[in-house]
């Protein structure tokens, strides 16, 4: 049981209509691994600078996350990102992106990382993702995230990377952009034709959907009255999804459907507070309780209609 | 078992990237009643002009819909609407709206219409909706639709009307606009505080959700590879929802959840062809088959997570 994530570890500065946080742990690998750590053993491959100290490292170690492959460049600075959300929280304006040590990131995998059973390739340059993909030869399942930047600037490389993975996890705007098709079902069909066994589409407040060649699964989002900070929700979803799968022997459709729920559960907690602060202190009871809530909010009796009285004709 | 609908009967001209139809049966009462007629007996209260001939009337009569309260003004013209859809079908540009006889529409209810068990107040001026509401004194359940025009131009009257109904059925943009709250859960709480027992929010390709004081229910849309003409999808949803409820003795939460599925099923068929042409020729087997498909696409096993192996700490 082991799960590897390759991605970014960053310091985020986030401003929302509800508050401001000047420096907190962020980045795809951070959100992913903290979320996944509730379900499985996680290894992180990423890079940080000399300004990344013991306090931040503890956020990983206290969740039992293996950081031996977290490279530290003492003379460099950690990736920093600043963003500001509008009142409706659907639009995020990036204030700045200081790549710092992340600009020359070359993922270095230890033997332990290379032998991971499940792998998540967080949103980094697609060439790097493919380089990692080629090293994890024993992986039973590899999932991939990406973003509009790579769709626009490195589309060919990205498609070659998608061809080599089992699951693509992106949002609906990205699925449409990637395939230049406004119909999500057709977009999914195109993406699956490239090679992946499954496409998972994140739809924010509308939930998530999973497409395979033979099946379709869709769930709503957990209803939240106060979304505080959406940053990292996608990676937290992926962490819950891959973390739960990593805990399962059979990686079949039924397990993937449950994993979608656990991913949604984790994401729903993530957005309740800044950064990883809500997710960090979750309990298994809280996670299972919200999992059950998903059953309640989606349940209906499958009773076919039979007309009791004929319409007058 | 009887269901009354008050709304518009129109001739629609619709252009989509896939084709054009210059004159077809449209309007909220048409889409609603044809959809509901698969589940229950329907009475239509609306108005048409002298240009509304036998051919159009047959679309109602062959579905067993009672049109004795469909007023005909021989010297007037039927309401006409023209619209054009963009490639992504989410944006509709209204080309023209010729109200014609609909401009001076005053719903006239026969004794039979007044005694309806269930009532749907289609999207018309809120004063008229309230006038009808006050005449259906025996109704067990009254549902209401509206649109952005009335939210902008007759908000106070609309809220007074909402206070008098059991269910409000609108889309998510309307729910946010009506309450000036971007968070749908908070918007729903506000609307329910005005009086309705339930709020149903239509989300187009993202499905639908139902809010009551104690519960939340959400479903995805049926996945469609080819949406041909979205006109009337909302009224067709409402028709399936109210039609199914009308066939049930208990109008409880469980019945309302099933009614949401039947509404979604009917709407998913409606958008496959122009106007009401797909819905008109549906069979009960097709309806029940798609109902079962909703169970399949939303099913997951409710197995709580138990960690098999402890993370190394």
Image: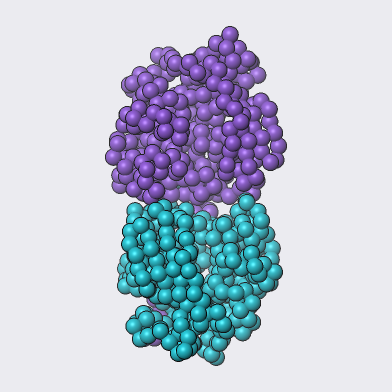
Chain colours: A cyan, B purple
Give x and y (percent) for residue A223: 38, 54
Q: Is residue A263 visible?
A: no
On screen, residue A74 versus residue A277, left or right, reads: right
Viewer-nearest residue: B235 or A59:
A59
On screen, residue A148 versus residue A19, left or right, reads: right
In what quadrant of the picture does the C terminus of chain A appear? top right
Give x and y (percent) for residue A42: 46, 80
Give x and y (percent) for residue A97: 49, 71
Q: Is residue B98 visible?
A: yes
Q: Is residue A49 above or below residue B137?
A: below
The quarter of the displayed image where residue A36 is located: bottom left
Q: Is residue B236 above or below residue B212?
A: above
Viewer-nearest residue: B42 or A137:
A137
On screen, residue B226 versus residue A242, left or right, reads: right
Q: Residue at x 39, y 36 (%)?
A: B168
Give x and y (percent) for residue A115: 55, 86
Q: Residue at x 50, y 57 (%)?
A: A203
């Amino acid at each position: 049981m082991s799960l590897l994530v390759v991605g970014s570890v960053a310091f985020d500065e986030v401003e929302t209509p509800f508050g401001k946080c000047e420096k907190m742990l962020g980045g795809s690998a951070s959100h992913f691994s903290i979320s996944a750590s509730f379900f499985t053993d996680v290894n992180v491959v990423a890079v940080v600078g000399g300004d990344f100290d013991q306090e931040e490292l503890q956020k990983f170690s206290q969740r039992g996350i293996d950081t031996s492959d977290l490279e530290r460049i003492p003379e460099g600075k950690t990736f920093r990102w600043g963003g500001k959300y509008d009142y409706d929280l659907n639009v995020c304006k990036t204030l700045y992106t200081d790549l710092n040590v992340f600009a020359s990131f070359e993922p270095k995998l230890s033997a332990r990382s290379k032998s991971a059973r499940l792998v998540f390739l967080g949103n980094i340059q697609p060439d790097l993702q493919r380089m990692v993909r080629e090293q994890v030869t024993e992986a039973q399942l590899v999932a991939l995230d990406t973003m509009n930047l790579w769709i626009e600037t490195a589309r060919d490389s990205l498609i070659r990377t998608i061809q080599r993975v089992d699951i693509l996890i992106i949002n609906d705007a990205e699925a449409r952009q990637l395939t230049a098709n406004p119909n999500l079902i057709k977009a999914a069909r195109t993406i699956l034709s490239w090679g992946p066994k499954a496409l998972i589409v994140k739809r924010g407040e509308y939930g998530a959907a999973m497409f395979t060649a033979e099946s379709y699964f869709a769930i709503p989002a957990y209803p939240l009255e106060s979304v505080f900070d959406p940053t990292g929700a996608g990676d937290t979803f992926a962490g819950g999804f891959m973390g739960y799968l990593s805990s399962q022997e059979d990686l079949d459709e039924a397990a993937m459907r449950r994993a979608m729920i656990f991913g949604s559960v984790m994401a729903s907690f993530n957005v309740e507070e800044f950064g990883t602060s809500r997710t960090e202190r979750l309990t298994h009871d809280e996670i299972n309780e919200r999992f059950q809530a998903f059953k309640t909010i989606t349940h209906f009796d499958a009773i076919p209609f039979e007309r009791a009285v004929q319409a007058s004709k």
